[in-house]
């Protein structure tokens, strides 16, 4: 799926039409982001990630959105993120990684582009990259304790962690002043090159995620993957910031 496909997707088209009917002029924008907007959507592994921007996040508006969003969730899609224009402007320092990812690949399905011209501070970006790399490494360790002796569960742990680390590597590439490729696999490869990491374990996890055979033993993959992620966290931790935008 790519941006033009998304605009013609019957599920998304019906949702947007329903939202416009439910809340009327209070609906300002509907934005698709993530793998579906980038063009690296993997069937049965990727989600339809949406941001819905409404004039105000008051209870009456939220109640108006509820029936349509519940129907969307029942189809197996994640809960859309809800913002107002004011909240987006006030959150650039809180969600710099997420907003940079959205800024690099998004499809506006309705209304104006709420992320056009949004400025991200470099110091906020580095802090979030460091914090979330450490937090996700903690979750990865906890998951390994629980599933190290169950190959199928370990494969799930590896493949479910990959998109989150790829998103953090996008932030890392911004900090390093490098070009950001559109696809997650290319982002990971570019960050590994820029940070002097071995990209092979990440390639193995990507093959597992695509369901390809011959990726190797999950336990051996995890050991090499974990080692390179530890090195990535140290690399980001040492990056200097001077404030301003990336």
Image (tube, rainbow, N blue to C red):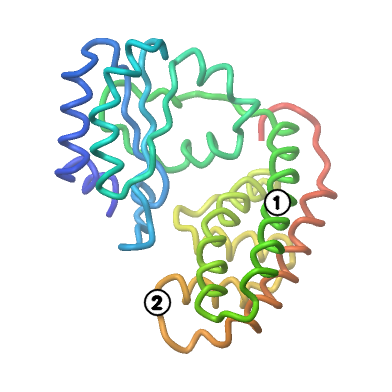
Query: Hey, which quadrant is residue 40 in on the image?
Result: bottom left
Q: Position of residue 65 (x, y in %)?
A: 29, 23
Give coordinates of residue 121: x percent, y percent: 68, 28
Location of mark 1 (residue): 133
Quadrant of the rendering where the N terminus is positioned? bottom left
Residue 230 numbered tag: none
Q: Is residue 113 above or below residue 209?
A: above
Which residue position is annotated with label 2?
Answer: 211
User: What residue do we see at 63% from left, 72% from top?
Assistant: 199
The residue shown at (77%, 63%) is 230
Q: Residue at x 67, y 46 (%)?
A: 177
Which circle's residue, 2 or 1, is located before the other in the chain? Answer: 1
Whether residue 88 is situated above or below residue 97 in the rendered picture:
above
Query: Residue 77 placed where, x, y %?
Result: 33, 46
Q: Quadrant of residue 203?
A: bottom right
At mark 2, the secondary structure is loop
Q: Viewed as shown, does residue 44 lie left or right of 231?
A: left
Q: Secondary structure at mark 1?
A: helix
């Amino acid at each position: 799926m790519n941006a033009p496909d998304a605009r013609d997707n019957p599920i998304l088209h019906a949702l947007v039409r329903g939202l416009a009917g439910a809340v009327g002029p209070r609906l300002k924008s509907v934005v698709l982001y993530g793998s579906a907007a980038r063009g690296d959507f993997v069937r049965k592994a990727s989600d339809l990630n949406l941001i819905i921007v409404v004039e105000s996040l008051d209870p009456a508006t939220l109640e108006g959105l509820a029936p349509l969003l519940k129907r969307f969730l029942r189809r197996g899609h994640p809960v859309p993120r809800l913002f107002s224009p004011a909240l987006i402007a006030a959150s650039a320092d809180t969600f710099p990684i997420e907003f940079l990812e959205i800024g690099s690949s998004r499809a506006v399905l309705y209304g104006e582009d709420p992320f056009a011209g949004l400025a991200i501070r470099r110091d906020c970006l580095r802090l979030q990259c460091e914090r979330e790399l450490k937090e996700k490494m903690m979750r990865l360790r906890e998951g390994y304790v629980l599933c190290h002796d169950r190959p199928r569960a370990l494969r799930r742990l590896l493949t479910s962690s990959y998109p989150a680390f790829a998103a953090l590597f996008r932030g890392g590439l911004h900090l390093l002043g490098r070009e950001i490729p559109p696809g997650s696999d290319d982002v990971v490869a570019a960050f590994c090159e820029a940070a002097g990491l071995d990209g092979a374990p990440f390639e193995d996890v990507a093959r597992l995620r695509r369901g390809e055979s011959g990726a190797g033993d999950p336990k051996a993959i995890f050991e090499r993957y974990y080692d390179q992620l530890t090195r990535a966290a140290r690399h980001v931790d040492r990056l200097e910031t001077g404030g301003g935008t990336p």
